[in-house]
Image (cartoon, helix red, strand yellow):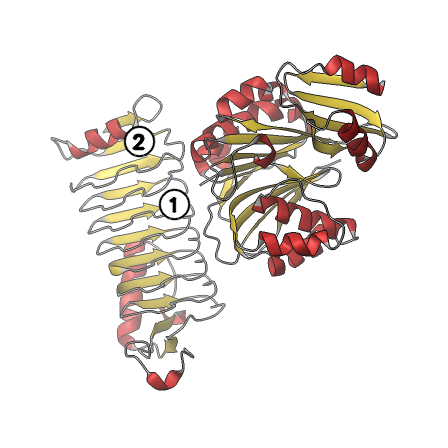
Amino acid sequence: MTVLDLEQLSVREINYALHHRDSMESVTLVNPGGAHNLAVGLDWPGEVEIRGHAGYFVGGMNKQATITVHGSVASSVAENMMSGLVRVRGNASQCAGASMHGGLLVVEGDAAARCGISLKGGDVVVGGRVGHASGFMAQAGRIVVCGDAGASLGDSLYEAVIYVGGGIKSLGADAQEEEMTEADVVVVRALLAKAGLAEDPARFRRVASARTLYHWNADAQQEY
Amino acid sequence: MCGVVGLLLKDGTRRAELGRLVTGMFETMGERGPDSGGLAVFGEPTTGALRRFNVFAPRRDYPWGELATALGASVEAIENHAVVSLAGTAPDFRRWLAEYDPTLHLLSAGRRINVYKDVGAAGAIAKRYRFPVLGGTHAVGHTRMATESAVSPARAHPFTAGEDFCLVHNGSLSNPNMLRRKLEAEGVAFETDNDTEAACRLIEWRLRAGDSLEQALEVAFRELDGFYTLVMGTGDSLTLVRDAFACKPAVIAETDSWVAIASEFRALAHLPDVASANVFEPEPERIYTWTVPN
């Protein structure tokens, strides 16, 4: 196992080293100190462990790699992830998993506002709560929230589906609660298992788009 | 961008370390606000009728000795900043100061607060005013990237109003002029054209009218239009609020020994036992407040 120390190396040097691996050995980053842009743009099926709190964009644009943060993360963790796994053992700030195309983001604690904003694929599983406007304009993929969801959940949602285990403060424009089918329970059970969370999939509720915003409605008088 | 920081020590034995700990926070957030910066530090209260007045001079070689003689009061000065200890009220001292030398600017008044602010890089400001050796119970700081009003010492944060109250702001308000007109009609005087000053004076005006901080902030939630993460200090408390959209970043870290606020976690990474701290993001329009233990 290789250990890279943020007190000895710059973020640029760390990312250079991660991008130029000649073996599949796992890498541990120590003393992250909330630094931004750690382990971004990886295209390598190895494991990266980050021991401490990380800053903005950790694991952004990830492809293949398994990245675990043993701490909390700032805004936009795993933004635009293509594949692989990013796991946050603590809490995440806003815009977790923004514009993700694939892969799995697990936040074991809480995620703040706009979790899964503009999700384009892949899955986001949050062990705790999510903040307001989560799932905003999410186009594809699935978001599983074990705790409560903040206001305006799924505002202007497209084809992504949100499963919520706790309460929902309010639904956003065009989001609606739908019946939880057997297929939904299977999906939630599989995602919880992948995330390593022991929750009962049967208690989750399904939120999806009512699709009323898909077409211009001249009679609506802008009353959406 | 701008950077905000706040630190309150729950552990009375750490009070001598306040300046050192908050300087690390302040300097790291200098990257978010390179044009000016400032720090409010709340320390042991003055006794009896004594107040501490912080005064800023445009000249670094200001003859503070003459001011001390004219006032017959104790003056502790570092370059263009002085702390005047005097029995009297803020309005009386402000009037006296304006008559004595209109180029002098009253930064703060109160029994516990000292305010240091200036243009320049955070590191240079911290060094000039010797932030690392300052002691106290809690502190509020700001590093500014000016967006809506000029770069000048008076427009640097923290802003103060009344006694023992200060506020720093990351964000932008869209209705400061409306608030200004409203408050001026209530007899509130403004010193700059800065949007943050409107928020500071609005909240302090409500506090002076007898509202609790919570009631004053409910008024602020209704009245302030725009984006804000606000950090406020009173004589015995540290408070944080964000607007309904919570676009401007903020992170709180809390242990049994301290609670710290910053725009980014990087500013907290050096704090003692931060690895075991509860690190979380504050919710929109929720009032987070901590009080200095007796």
Q: Is residue A120 above or below residue A170?
A: above
Name the chain under label 1. A
Q: How dense is the environment of label 1, judged by Cα within 10 Å: few (below 14), some, or many (20 and up)? A: many
Q: Is residue B250 visible?
A: yes
Q: Residue at x 33, y 79 (%)?
A: A212
Q: How dense is the environment of label 2, judged by Cα within 10 Å: few (below 14), some, or many (20 and up)? A: some
Which amino acid, by three-letter code, is at mark 2?
A: Leu
Which numbered tag is attached to residue A157? Answer: none
Q: Is residue B194 above or below residue B221?
A: above
Which numbered tag is attached to residue A29? Answer: 2
Q: Which residue is mark 1?
A: A89
A94, A188: nearer the viewer = A94
Horizontal side, residue B170 vs residue A44: left or right? right
Could you tell me residue A81's position as x and y percent? 24, 50
Q: Residue at x 79, y 29 (%)?
A: B99
* Disc 1 secondary structure class: loop
Name the chain under label 2. A
Quadrant of the frame with the N terminus of chain B: top left
Q: Is residue A59 above or below residue A5?
A: below
Q: Count the labels in the image.
A: 2
Q: Residue at x 66, y 40 (%)?
A: B191
